Image (cartoon, rainbow, N blue to C red):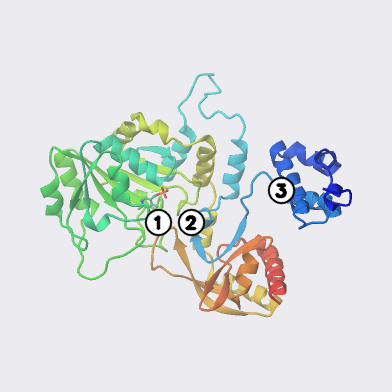
Amino acid sequence: MTDADPRRAIPRTDALLMLPPVRAARARLGEHVVRGLVRDAQDRARRGDLAPEQVESAVLESLSGQTGTTLRPVLNATGVVVHTNLGRAPLSAAAVEALVAASGYVDVELDLATGARSKRGVAARAALLAACPAAEDALVVNNGAAALVLTTTALAAGREVVVSRGELIEIGAGFRLPDLIASTGARLREVGTTNRTHLRDYADAIGPQTGCILKVHPSNFAVHGFTASVGLAELRPLATEHDVALVADLGSGLLSPDPLLPAEPDAATTLAAGADIVTASGDKLLGGPQAGVVLGRAGVITRLARHPLARAVRADKLTLAALEATVSGAAAPVTRALHADPDQLRSRAERLAAAVGATVVAHDGRVGGGGAPGVPLPGWAVRLPEAAAAALRTGDPAVLPRVHDGACLIDLRCVPETDDGRLLAAVRAALDRIG
Ligand SMILES: *Cc1c(COP(=O)(O)O)cnc(C)c1O
């Protein structure tokens, strides 16, 4: 390095760290994060990608956008209500409030009246039972898969889970239910065929080795044509006769029937039809945080709760708080989006389209999350040039549209109406960027 080397002019680390905005950032960000951003800017200057006099502003700029998380909020303009890649259900305002309230010290396992230890999760349990009176007891675990793992482990490890070949499903991202069950040490006793399973298939398979009978809702596909399956009401006498538990994995988490989704099973109806317990996700149609919910007979749920594995899949205080608030609160965002009024969606879409000189087209939303395949949710979308999609995704706020048929479609179903202004600004900015 010579005296004339411009790299000599790169500001030193200690000088950069003493700049007032950098010192302020050090109060909210970890030291290693701040130093990392300083080093990045200096490195860019050393490589010649940045002039030495630009280092300071580059550091300030990178710090200004830096928050505690790099996860970015996204406006979901796809029309897919339970969007797995966007974190499934968005939380209700009540759930967010509960989450924040539970984030500090909280009486999750303490009875404040007596000062004695209390049972974890009693409040979430009470809320679930109030919303689903058909259940005698409830247990909340980490997610739907954990609910199934705990169930098959506690009821059937070393024994058999009797399940129809028509219900051995893969859910998504290579997650296969049969593999999950086999991983617990339970053996799968497959009965029937892909398209047809009869009561006698179950009857022939049940014996001393049976741990439980499992019915799985094939949430993400439907078999049409020459089909037959056995309902819970038919299986109930068989389960009683052999004294084995009848388990139904619902997936979606509806607690009671939704007339919009007649084919989607719900906990109340499934328990009334004869299931001993149902398992479901908290963040699909229930509209809450990631959780697994088990509802049903007290005796079976006690067996699950007492199993050592229950500790490994237990829900944390934030989940319990958000789930309780979701179940007890007003309709969650997922429910609102599902039941959005098409006329209102149309007028919102027309307003947005008029503001940017675009057109509105009919567009069906979807339930998503592997639920209710083939059920369209009639609505509307603003049609933009396909090139707008990338600009929208990388804009601020980030917007995820649907790219279909050579167009970028903006469906307002899952965008809260209070965000229409931000969405319009994002669309304008995206259209400007693509010219
Ligand atoms: C989604 C789903 C699961 C898994 O639930 P997670 O909450 O994703 O772990 C299990 N069974 C069915 C039928 C499902 O739809």
Q: Is residue 392 above or below residue 181?
A: below
Residue at point 77% right, 56% down? Answer: 48
- Return the residue nearer the eye: 328 or 97: 97
Residue at point 50% right, 61% down? Answer: 81
Residue at point 12% right, 41% down? Answer: 207
Q: Specify the amino acid type for callout 3.
A: Gln
State which quadrant residue 133 falls in: top left
Taking the view exactly as shown, the residue that stands out farthest to the right is 3
Residue 66 is labelled as 3
Where residue 395 appears, as percent x and y from the top left, is 67, 63
Residue 190 visible in rendering: yes
Q: Earlier in the sequence, mark 3 or mark 1?
A: 3
Where residue 319 appears, as percent x and y from the top left, is 51, 40
Mark nearer the viewer, 1 or 2: 1
- Return the residue nearer the eye: 3 or 23: 3
Q: Specify the amino acid type for callout 1.
A: Gly
Where residue 34 appears, as percent x and y from the top left, is 73, 42
Mark nearer the viewer, 3 or 2: 3
- Return the residue nearer the eye: 254 or 257: 254
Residue at point 49% right, 35% down? Answer: 123
Residue under pointer 2: 84
Residue under pointer 1: 172
- Count of residue discs: 3
How many neighbours does mark 3 have within 10 angstroms: few (below 14), some (14-19), or many (20 or more)?
some
Task: Check if mark 1's residue and mark 2's residue have beta carbons within 8 Å.
Answer: yes
Left/right of residue 427 with respect to residue 306 in the rendered view:
right
Quadrant, the C terminus = bottom right
| Some atom of ligand 1 lies within 8 Å of the CB belonging to the residue at label 1 | yes
How many neighbours does mark 1 have within 10 angstroms: few (below 14), some (14-19), or many (20 or more)?
few
State which quadrant residue 355 falls in: bottom right
Q: Is residue 186 above or below residue 190?
A: above
